[in-house]
Image (cartoon, grey):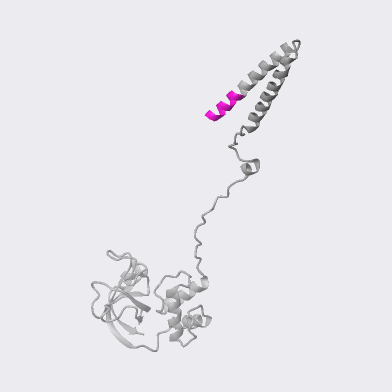
Amino acid sequence: MLHDKTKEFIILKTILITNSYVRILLRDLIKPPFFVVWIIPLLVIHLFFLCAVTEAAPAKKSTSLPPSRTAAKVPVKQHSAPPVRIGDPKIKHLQQLLANTGFYPGSMTGVLDVSTKEAITLAQKTWKLKQTGKYDQKLVGVLTQEAKIKPKNYRKKLVMKATAYTSQDPGCGNLTKREHLLRKGLVAVDPKVVPLGTRLYIEGYGYAIADDIGSAIKGATIDLAYETRNEAFRFGRKTITVFVL
């Protein structure tokens, strides 16, 4: 800022001096020519100095962008939401069949995740099909039939005292011991009698998986999960036959 004011002062001073020389020149035109001889060179020198100072003064930098850049818009990066995993209806149907036959303890999501692949592979092995861990139309047909009938082959048969429970019961959570959402088809057992993860068939209940435990479930007792409390109340307490598959 100080440098700019100094240059302005020099330019103004030069203009004033030049004006003085011009007045002297005009006044002395009628005088002997030796006055003109020294005035004219001085005038030329000052004019040259004025031009040099003017050209040397740097132009002020524009703080605005060129028109082309001013009009340009900076693109804003959009953060899109993660893609939603939409379940495949065919996989969901297969999961339901696997659950109905005691192979799958998870939820019906329609997603071919690790637990679903493991259940498919186990079912394919059980029915002596090619073990792919993928959707299998032949497996769908076999499971559809098997879900309707009592299994012919089993490892052992147990007579157990049975009760029923739901996730709405006081003190009961939504998850089983093996971290699955509690639903019909999952039962609580004493792991010393029936290991967790065991596939079962229960008369009057259907296929099931030993997936939960309970403080009152000791020895030859079993607690059957239902979706609603009305269903659990209707079941009450019974002595049932459990087939270990």
* Residue 148 is at least partly visible in this image: no
Give me the residue at 50% from left, 80% from top: 140
Span shown in magenta: 2-10
Q: Is residue 212 left or right of residue 8?
A: left
Give me the residue at 42% from left, 84% from top: 149
Q: Is residue 147 above or below residue 17?
A: below
The C terminus, quarter of image: bottom left
Q: Residue 190: percent from the left, percent from the top?
A: 26, 78
* Relative depth, front residue between 53 and 188: 53
Give me the residue at 50% from left, 78% from top: 134
Q: Residue 3: percent from the left, percent from the top?
A: 54, 30
Q: Is residue 121 left or right of residue 20?
A: left
Q: Residue 14: percent from the left, percent from the top?
A: 63, 22
Which secondary structure class fits the magenta region best? helix
Residue 8 part of the magenta segment: yes
Q: Is residue 232 above or below residue 71?
A: below
Q: Is residue 167 left or right of residue 98?
A: left
* Relative depth, front residue between 150 and 214: 214
* Relative depth, front residue between 213 and 143: 213
* Residue 178 is at least partly visible in this image: yes
Q: Is residue 139 above or below residue 113?
A: below
Q: Is residue 136 above or below residue 35?
A: below
* Residue 192 location, quadrant: bottom left
Q: What is the number of callouts on the image? A: 0
* Residue 153 location, quadrant: bottom left
Q: Residue 191: percent from the left, percent from the top?
A: 27, 78
* Residue 36 location, quadrant: top right
